[in-house]
Amino acid sequence: MLTISRSASSVTDHEFDILDELYFVTSFSDLQQRTNLSPAKLEQNLRTMLEQGLIRCYWPDPDTELAYEPTSFGAIGCDSFFLASKEGLLQHNTR
């Protein structure tokens, strides 16, 4: 009998909803509006997803990728743009 277990790297419901919106580069404000998450909850999820490598961050414009820095993300997160990474798309599509 084949059993399927939930892997440690599966995404949460909120992360799934966020990834659903990140097939194209999307601003924080558009992402917040489309997911109906509070700014604080969205930022928390984005931090976790950046740490896991599920998404990429772009700042100050949608063409400039920025390495995730936990200490400065709070100051620029709401002005950033986001895109699902290859790993994020894989997690989204295999859930």
Image (cartoon, rainbow, N blue to C red):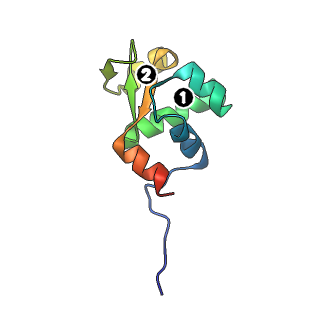
How many other residues sit within 10 Å of disc 2, few (<14), some (14-19) or many (≥20)?
some
Disc 2 on helix, strand or loop?
helix
- Vertical position of residue 27 compared to residue 23: above or below: above
Q: Residue furthest front?
A: 24
How many other residues sit within 10 Å of disc 1, few (<14), some (14-19) or many (≥20)?
some
| Residue 30 image position (x, y, % from top left) | 58, 22
- Inter-mark Cα distance, 1 to 2: 9 Å
Say how many tags the image has. Answer: 2
User: Which amino acid type corresponds to the residue marked 2 in the rendered image?
Assistant: Phe
**In the foreground, 53 or 22:** 22
Can you identify the residue that label 1 sits on? 43
CB within 8 Å, label 1 to label 2: yes
Can you identify the residue that label 2 sits on? 73
| Residue at position x 48%, y 49% in the image | 92
| Residue at position x 40%, y 41% in the image | 54
Q: Which mark is residue 79?
A: none
